[in-house]
Image (cartoon, rainbow, N blue to C red):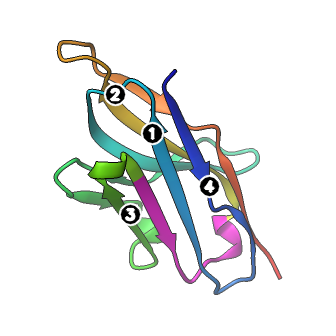
Amino acid sequence: QLQLVESGGGLVQPGGSLRLSCAASGSIFSIYDMGWYRQAPGKERELVASIASGGRSNYADSVKGRFTISRDNSKNTVYLQMNSLKPEDTAVYYCNADLVTTRYGLLRHYWGQGTQVTVSS
């Protein structure tokens, strides 16, 4: 069974740091783009950052210069280093991956279960 399992969320004070991890496991042939989204209460889910298999990354304007996305292709894992956290970063963070499970399979979009990040003093 294919899973994306996130870890690393929690409560942090403004200005603090957290590192999120998301590991994909199961029947995987190849992973293309991986990324992190977030959803705050009463708001729509939004893209935070994404990274292609070759390492090219993309960030939301609100996190540029503070967050860094990276991946370890040998471990099918994507990371999000979050520095200088602000209260407005509070949200449930979801990882996602575009992948195929077999050589000629369809490209599908998979989601993790989400991890809560709360920035508060």
Residue position marked by numbered label 3 in the rendering = 69
C-alpha span from label 1 to label 3? 16 Å
* Tag in front: 1 or 3: 1
Residue position marked by numbered label 1 in the rendering = 24
C-alpha span from label 4 to label 2? 20 Å
Q: Residue sitting at 75 percent across and 44 percent down?
A: 42
Depicted 68 relative to depicted 9: above or below: below
Residue position marked by numbered label 2 in the rendering = 28
Range drawn in magenta: 78-89
The local crowd at label 2, few if under 14, some if 14 to 19, many if 20 or more residues have their Cα within 10 Å, is some
Determine contact: label 4, label 2, CB under 8 Å.
Answer: no
Amino acid type, label 2:
Ile
Secondary structure beneath dot 1 equals: strand
Label 4 vs 2, first from the N-terminus: 4
Label 2 vs 3, first from the N-terminus: 2
The local crowd at label 4, few if under 14, some if 14 to 19, many if 20 or more residues have their Cα within 10 Å, is some
| Residue 71 horizontal side relative to residue 93, left or right | left
Q: Residue sitting at 53 percent across and 31 percent down?
A: 3
Residue position marked by numbered label 4 in the rendering = 7
